[in-house]
């Protein structure tokens, strides 16, 4: 049991660190202090608890040391974080955060015949993002700080960018790629574990060491998001006009002290986004 706690904490920690570092380089100067305090903490706790629960449900498989047992074991541990963030979390938000829903911003979208729940969240930093891809589990999140620092027109453009992510099915696309890479890496891990564990007897050491290259691959996998960001920009630009989206991005960049000009694994730099929007003018 103590083995499992150590493993959960180490792997889960690495995954959260790389994931949150990846997405927050674009949106906030506050990493890591405030994100440790907000989303990082709740996501880390919930996924760790879920894993322990799953561990007990499947413990007969997980302890038997067979191929299937190892596969289930590693699948839960490596994929639970993404399953939580993409599938469980949006439903939790819809159920528990009703008071944070914003009719005003939902009306911005209704005008263009898009119906998505928009939630205003508290963590510091200026950010908006789309979350979830299953039926009735697609939401848009925007932070209070972002709303307070930008005009309604800019917010409308940014929200339509997030609608673009939903409408163009970017989230199931990211999820399937991450899941596919996960399964390949889990199969390698199961293979290594089946051959090494018994001989050397270092139970689950392989898995702990595996966490580092795994987290790094996940971190660089963020690059697959870049072309989709341009697509979401274009989606918004087609509705409001390219100049409105260019203005919104420039204002977002100013509001975040030049964040959009800096390198990010997941988002193209501002100049590239503007260049691609100018083609639509
Ligand atoms: Zn985006």
Image: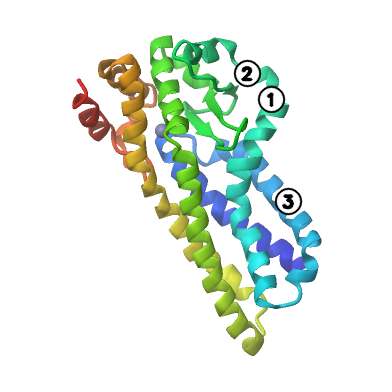
Q: Is mark 3 within 8 Å of ligand 1?
A: no
Q: What's the distance in space between the residues labelled 2 and 1, CA to CA?
A: 7 Å
Q: Quadrant of residue 55?
A: bottom right
Identify the residue under disc 1: 97
**In the image, what residue occupies the spot 50% across and 13% down?**
110
Q: Position of residue 61 (x, y in %)?
A: 75, 70
- Give the x, y percent position of residue 274: 24, 28
Q: Of the two numbered discs 2 and 3 on the same chain, state the one appearing first in sequence.
A: 3
Disc on res. 143: none
Report x, y in % for residue 208.
59, 68
Q: Is residue 1 visible?
A: no
> What's the CA distance linking mark 1 and mark 3?
21 Å
Residue at (56, 78) in percent of width and height: 191
Residue 101 got which mark? 2
Residue at far bottom of view? 199
Q: Is residue 32 left or right of residue 49?
A: left
- Say if mark 2 contacts mark 1, CB within 8 Å: yes
Q: According to the image, what is the colour scheme of the structure? A: rainbow
In primary-sequence order, the first of circles 1 and 3 is 3
- Residue at screen point 69% across, 34% down: 92
The answer to which image quadrant residue 67 occupies is: bottom right
Quadrant of the snapshot with the N terminus: bottom right
Say which quadrant the C terminus sits in: top left
- Secondary element under disc 2, as helix, strand or loop, is loop
| Residue 17 position (above or below residue 158) | below
Residue 166: % across, % down = 47, 32
* Residue shown at the point (29%, 34%) measured from the top left: 261
User: In the drawing, does residue 218 fall left or right of residue 78?
Assistant: left
Q: Which residue is mark 3?
A: 50
């Amino acid at each position: 049991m103590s083995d499992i706690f150590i493993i959960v904490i180490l792997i889960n920690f690495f995954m959260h660190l790389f994931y949150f570092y990846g997405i927050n380089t674009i949106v906030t100067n506050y990493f890591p202090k405030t994100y440790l305090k907000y989303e990082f903490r709740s996501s880390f706790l919930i996924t760790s608890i879920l894993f322990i629960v799953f561990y007990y449900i499947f413990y007969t498989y997980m302890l038997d040391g067979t191929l299937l047992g190892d596969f289930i074991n590693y699948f839960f541990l490596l994929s639970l974080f993404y399953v939580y963030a993409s599938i469980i979390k949006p439903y939790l938000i819809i159920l528990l955060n009703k008071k944070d829903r914003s009719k005003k911003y939902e009306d911005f979208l209704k005008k263009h015949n898009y119906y998505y729940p928009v939630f205003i969240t508290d963590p510091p930093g200026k950010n908006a993002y789309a979350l979830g891809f299953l039926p009735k589990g697609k939401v848009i999140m925007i932070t209070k700080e972002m709303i307070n620092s930008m005009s309604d027109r800019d917010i409308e453009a940014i929200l339509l960018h997030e609608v673009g992510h939903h409408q163009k099915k970017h989230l199931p696309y990211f999820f399937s790629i991450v899941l596919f890479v996960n399964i390949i890496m889990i199969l390698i891990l199961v293979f290594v574990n089946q051959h090494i564990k018994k001989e050397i007897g270092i139970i689950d050491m392989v898995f702990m060491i595996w966490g580092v290259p795994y987290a790094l691959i996940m971190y660089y996998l963020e690059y697959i998001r870049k072309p989709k960001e341009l697509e979401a920009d274009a989606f918004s630009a087609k509705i409001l006009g390219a100049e409105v989206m260019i203005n919104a991005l420039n204002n977002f960049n100013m509001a975040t002290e030049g964040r959009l000009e800096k390198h990010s694994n997941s988002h193209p730099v501002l100049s590239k986004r503007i260049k691609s929007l100018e083609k639509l003018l």
